[in-house]
Image: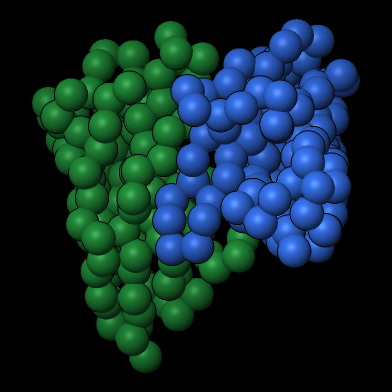
Chain colours: A blue, B green
């Protein structure tokens, strides 16, 4: 199956700093990418949907100025957590689907963010 | 978005079949039924999906009720590596295939 990678896998940062997480589709062109966050013992919560070359669509309650999403190419999307605070500590997961296989969605391994 | 209902947890013995149920009584005609599973500290892994007919692949089988209001994921022989949270999800092509996760079923496998 198609492979989606995320970098970094873990990051620890100080409160007030910004953190960028990369999501790459390694062997296919991802026309759509999705970003999720997951707190311990909870399910995944969809944050936003991004299509290549256009602005991301954020789910209700997700601050677009706090979580900046860029999908500048067909293989790369980035999520930047701006001015991170301890409550932003979470497991962030991206997924991607292609135009040809829009019914299939492939998930990255996740990024563990800890804000001190 | 149409919702799914799954038991919070299930337990199985190793080497035995496991039937994981999912109710989706408000499913629409354009909803595909997808199953993913997630191991601790990993991203979800695709298991299987279907629309109306039963489906088989190397990982599992998916049995879909005739009225499509419920489905069952079947693991033919559970192994310890199958212990995970299993999510039953409806994906609608008309809704841009957005995937909304429910609570899922945590499967425990006993040796």
Name the quadrant containing residue B34: top left
**Height in image: B9 above or below A85?**
below
Q: Nearer the viewer, residue A116 or B34?
A: A116
Q: Can residue A15 be seen in this view?
A: yes
Q: Is residue A46 left or right of residue A71?
A: left
Identify which residue is drawn at 34% across, 52% down.
B104
Image quarter in which the N terminus of chain B is found: top left
**Height in image: A34 above or below B28?**
below
Identify which residue is drawn at 82% across, 58% down.
A14
Identify which residue is drawn at 60% across, 53% down.
A87
Name the quadrant containing residue A75: top right
The spot of residue B12 in percent (x, y) is: 27, 77
Q: Is residue B83 left or right of residue B64?
A: right
Q: Nearer the viewer, residue A99 or A33?
A: A33
Q: Is residue A19 visible?
A: no
Q: Is residue A112 left or right of residue B25?
A: right
Mark count: 0
Q: Is residue A49 left or right of residue A66?
A: left
**Height in image: A30 above or below A2?**
above
The spot of residue B75 in percent (x, y) is: 34, 62
Q: Nearer the viewer, residue A107 or A21?
A: A21
**Height in image: A24 above or below B79?**
above
Image quarter in which the C terminus of chain B is found: bottom left
The spot of residue A88 in percent (x, y) is: 64, 49
Q: Which residue lies furthest to the front in this view?
A: A16
The spot of residue B25 in percent (x, y) is: 14, 29
Identify which residue is drawn at 18% across, 24% down.
B26
Q: Which of A88 and B55 is in front in this view?
A: A88
């Amino acid at each position: 199956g198609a492979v989606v990678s995320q970098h970094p896998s873990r990051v620890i940062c100080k409160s007030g700093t910004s953190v960028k997480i990369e999501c790459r589709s390694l062997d296919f062109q991802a026309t759509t990418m999705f970003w999720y966050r997951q707190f311990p013992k909870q399910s995944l919560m969809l944050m936003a949907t991004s299509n290549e070359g256009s602005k991301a669509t954020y789910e209700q309650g997700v601050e677009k100025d706090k979580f900046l999403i860029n999908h500048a190419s067909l293989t790369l999307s980035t999520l930047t957590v701006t001015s991170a605070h301890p409550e932003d500590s979470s497991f962030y997961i991206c997924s991607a689907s292609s135009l040809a296989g829009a019914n299939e969605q492939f998930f990255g391994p996740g990024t563990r963010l800890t804000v001190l | 978005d149409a919702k799914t209902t799954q038991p919070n947890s299930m337990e199985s013995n190793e080497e035995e079949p496991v039937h994981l149920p999912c109710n989706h009584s408000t499913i629409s005609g354009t909803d595909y039924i997808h199953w993913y599973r997630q191991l601790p500290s990993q991203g979800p892994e695709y298991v299987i999906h279907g629309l109306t007919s039963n489906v088989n692949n190397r990982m599992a089988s998916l049995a879909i009720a005739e009225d499509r209001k419920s489905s069952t994921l079947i693991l033919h022989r559970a192994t310890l590596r199958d212990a995970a949270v299993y999510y039953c999800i409806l994906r609608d092509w008309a809704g841009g295939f957005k995937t909304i996760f429910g609570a899922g079923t945590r499967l425990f496998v006993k040796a």
